[in-house]
Image (cartoon, coloured by chain):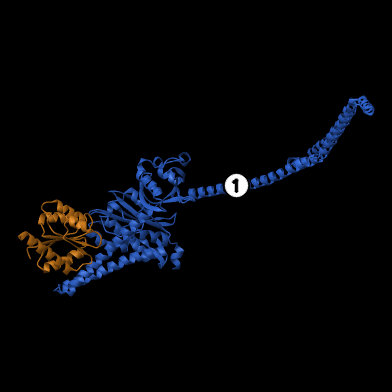
Amino acid sequence: MADKRVLIVDDEIHIIHVVAIKLRNNGYEVISADNGAEAFDLAMRDKPNIIVTDFQMPVMTGLELVEKLRQHEETKDIPVIMLTARSFAISQEQQDELRISGCLSKPFSPKELLGNIEDILYEKELVTDN
Amino acid sequence: MRFGRSLYMIATSVVAYSMFTGTLAKAQNSGTEEGWCLAGYAQRMPVALVCFVVVAMGVILLGWYWLRLARAITSIARLIKDGKANAIGNGKGFFASLRMANIDELCEAFDKHFDDCSVRIAEYEKQIKDLQIQIQLSLRREKNAEAIIYSIRDAVIVFDEYDRLLMANEAAGRLFKFDFSNSQHTPLTELLGADHREFAGFISHCRKSKGQATRREIELLEDGDSKTFDCIVSCVYDQSRQVCGVVVVLHDITRERQIQQMKNDFVSHVSHELKTPLASITAYSEMLVDGETNDEKTRKEFYSVIQNQANRLSRLIEDILNTSRIESGLIKVNKEPVSLTMLIKEQLQMIKGCAEEKNVEIVGQKPIVFDQVYVDRDMMSQVIINLLSNAVKYTRSGGTVKISTEVDEVASLVRVIVTDTGVGIPEDEVERVFDKFYRVGANKKQAKGTGLGLNLVKQMVESVHDGRVFVTSKVGVGSTFGFELPLATRQTVGTV
């Protein structure tokens, strides 16, 4: 798993910290950003395998970040998991349209997040292999 | 009757005379001597005498009737002279006089007719009075209805069964830009204009469908501003249950919608703000429980995060409760003499770390000789920290936040001013920044918040301490927030 890179985007440093520990403990490489604009630059540069982003952030929201990612060839296929404190913030249509792989409602369990990441990456690998 | 009898007497005389002359003629024709004698005697009687007698009787009769008529006329004249024209008018005096002239039957017939007429006239007069009263009542009701409609702040328009304007109040005229006095009976589509064709169609449809009260929310432009109206169209029915018009009431719910939106935003923000520390607490606790932390240092760090996030959660809940308590007047206030300079110094220490992290310079004030105010220390600390943290939040890296106090001895006031070089607030939003739950649209992305901080400042300064808050701002240049409070008198300070 060491070759899997995860980009975590949240303006709450504590969330980044705890998720990073959980993922590193499970063999992932973690990079982080505290807003959407910075995350996009990192995604373009470091090409993470998956992005975990908060929904509500200053400068650029999680949704705006995904929209931007989907517009660029280098980032358009990166799976995204959205963390949100608002249950109804993203509709199913938006999720389908922006190809958001999953949504986790805050407060969330790091274990559950890890499970989601593993599932999504596994599915992606299967698709790539075939 | 008497007149008849007189005529009978005259006729009898004429017949007797004829019979007498007839007998004479027979005697003459008989050829006897007595017959000739009698006939000769008769022929000697002058015919003129008979005529004279008849004429004389006629004259006497006419004279007698003339006298009666003259007496009746005299009687009528007397009644007129006595001002009793009504008695003549209703026929009684006149015919009573004529009755004396022996024309009783005719008089009685006329009397009866006049009596009937009088009864009918009285009935008609009563009906006319009733109608006049009803007209007065209807006019009064119409005036009342008009007064009610005119006094309603909502726009009210009444159309007839042909969709023509019957009545409208000033609010409706303002909204659809027409003058009611010149627009009566104007067709609906013409009155509302091309801009509101769909709305006109909706009203027309409601009338045709005979709906009791059809409701729809519509957006209309008023003085260039888009407004939301709750529109109710009700059909008016006549006695045969046929639609004879429609009443359209437009209630402006723009403010309600804005408040609703603000409440939704508030719930959303609060939910987010509450869930964020809760998310940290949950995640860190799980990591500790799952043994993901191998060393004591990391465990301590996790405990510390949990504690800080719990405190954060507690503060947020306290803010929400404080707002509610102040509004309901249930908050406990412990006023004491406090030096604002000292209070500011304490709060600057609190904000220092956050400002440094963001690379924002904080410039404090110079000490002032006497700036004591009689306030609740905790509340005033919160006022200052809210203003300072807001200034830091909306100031970009490299910017400056200044805080100072001024004493106005003439007005006996002390003023605290917090100036930043932040993003600023658009002019049309400056007045609303102290509103509960309000967040400046353009600055929402700049920092998180519930829209409660500045509202708490205003409540605490103005409602609890009889002070005043103020703000000036320019987009891209920065903002100045502040408040002023009455200076504590030296006596107050001394006695406490």
Instruction: Give the color of chain B as drawn.
Output: blue
Is residue B90 in sight in this rendering? Answer: no
| Residue B44 rendering spot, x and y as whole percentages | 93, 24
Which residue sits at x=28%, y=65%?
Answer: B274
Against A120, residue B113 (above or below) is above
- The answer to whether residue A76 of the structure is visible from this angle is yes
The picture's colour for chain A is orange
**Residue B67 picture location, percent across and down:** 85, 35
Q: Position of residue B474 (x, y in %)?
A: 31, 48
Residue at the outermost left position = A129
Q: Quickly name the residue at label 1.
A: B131
- Nearer the observer, B29 or B131: B29
Q: Dividing the image into 4 quarters, which one contains the N terminus of chain A?
A: bottom left
Q: Residue at x 15, y 65 (%)?
A: A116
Q: Nearer the viewer, residue B109 or B466?
A: B109
Q: What is the x, y in percent for residue B199?
A: 36, 46
- Left or right of B74, for residue B246: left
Q: Does A102 sit left or right of B368 as displayed? A: left
Q: Which one is in front, B153 or B147?
A: B147
Res B201 quadrant in image: top left
Count of labels shown?
1
Q: Amino acid at mark 1?
A: Leu
